[in-house]
Image: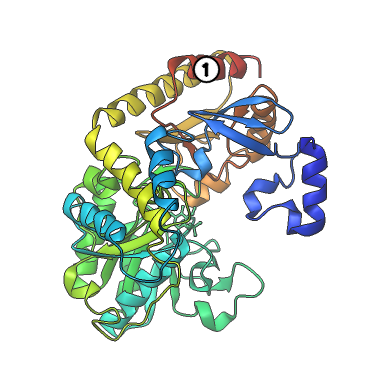
Amino acid sequence: MRNSDIFNESKIYMPGGVNSPVRAYVGLDVDPPVIKKGIGAHVFDEDGKEYVDFISAWGPMILGHCDEDVVKAIKDTVEDAISFGAPTDLELKLAKHICTTIDNVDMIRMVNSGTEATMSAVKVARGCTKRDKIIKFAGCYHGHFDGFLVEAGSGVLTSNIPGSPGVPKGSIENTLIAQYNDIGSVKELFEKYPEDIAAVIIEPIAGNMGVIPAKQKFLEDLRELCTKHGTILIFDEVMTGFRVAYKGAQSLYGIKPDLSTFAKIMGGGLPSGAYGGRRDLMEQLTPMGPVYQAGTMSGSPIVMAAGYATVTKLYNNPHYYDYMDKIAEKLQKEAEEVAKEKGLPLVINRRVNMMTMFFNEGGEVTNYKQAKACDTKLYGRFFEHMLKGGMFMSPSQFEAMFIGVKHTEEDIEKFIDLARKF
Ligand SMILES: Cc1ncc(COP(=O)(O)O)c(C=O)c1O
């Protein structure tokens, strides 16, 4: 069947024809390509068209599609071990590797998605502090857990309105919203609730309002405030972990979170997640402590094998990060030049190998408000032009573009030649 036949029939059986909303290209004049296979940095649709892939499965495929070592690890494992619901050596290997190579993770628990990781980390923080409130930042996404789905509104202290029908008001009454890169907005909340805030959760480099890196001083001040108030600082590294650096964004900033969450890359492209951090906190989890969290599929042998193959390959090849930085820098610089030639208000936010192209007359983009003020219609037209020319990138400006180890200078040149025709 062709792309269009498959997608149209999918709409009969799955809402919007998809299993996760951003894939549906709502509001755009094109339908999503139906992807059949991926090799390295390229994907192919059911019509046989080839694309350079900057989506990277929304982050996980840093080694490229069907990396030979990851495929081998999956094949070798599946012959013997699909699921046991019991301890395995495979989960020990991955847990030990992460705990011994990531600075701020003494103990870890495997789960099955980023959402599960973040909601469980918050539960640990609440259980340990015996407090209920959490602070999250406008524009940061931590998964579809009710407590995170808060429409941030315009003001810092506006009353919370659920960001989705189906989220009871009660589920978010303990979720406080602060503004990214604005420590004053966090201070205000701590002044109002000095002893009630269990956790602050943040993407240290935001990727879900487009890429917006936190400012160094902002994160330092945030760490200090959390320590002062006995609040657990959670770095959501679901996207940035093993990506911007092997040791994640926390290593780039030199800041020690109390808990960290991971997913995406750590499962090598299979459904995965994990949270970990300070031993005294993690020891509060059942069966050691009273904070309950469990999962039939957690630590799935095949996921552990794919994850181990991926993170050890990244760990053993630190030069990959320099390479990705170099390729991403080429893309950024040349795209900026093209935009200048054409008089387009392009602003690129980049940290190492993740970036977003914003169209913003107003200059820099450092928070959600500024991200929302960008010209998303122009981004949509740019996206459609690039898709037609064989570039697979996010249909929404509120996402990241990912560069992996298999992207080449030639891929970037193709992107730039096409962008020049926009
Ligand atoms: C920073 C961050 N946290 C959490 C999540 C949720 O992860 P998942 O989609 O695996 O549930 C995402 C997903 O994109 C994410 O980017």
Q: Residue at x 44, y 64 (%)?
A: 83
Q: Is residue 377 above or below residue 287?
A: above
Ligand 1 contact, mark 1 (Cβ < 8 Å):
no
Q: Looking at this view, is 298 or 24 the one in front?
A: 298
Q: Is residue 396 left or right of residue 223?
A: right
Q: Looking at this view, is 177 or 209 the one in front?
A: 209
Q: Quadrant of residue 282?
A: bottom left
Q: Residue at x 55, y 33 (%)?
A: 38
Image coordinates for residue 29, horizontal then vertical, percent: 78, 37
If the image is split into quadrants, where does the C terminus sit? Answer: top right
Image coordinates for residue 2, horizontal then vertical, percent: 79, 35
Q: Residue at x 52, y 36 (%)?
A: 362
Residue 334: in sight, yes or no?
yes
Q: Residues within 10 Å of mark 1 (few under 14, many from 20)?
A: few
Q: Is residue 270 left or right of residue 29?
A: left
Image coordinates for residue 247, horizontal then vertical, percent: 25, 46
Q: Looking at this view, is 244 or 266 the one in front?
A: 266
Judging from the image, what secondary structure is the residue with disc 1 in? helix
Residue behind mark 1: 340
Q: Is residue 294 above or below residue 142?
A: below
Image coordinates for residue 223, horizontal then vertical, percent: 22, 61
At label 1, the amino acid type is Lys
Residue 220: in sight, yes or no?
no
If the image is split into quadrants, where does the N terminus sit? Answer: top right
Q: Quadrant of residue 128?
A: bottom left
Marks counted in the figure total: 1
Q: Is residue 273 left or right of residue 392?
A: left
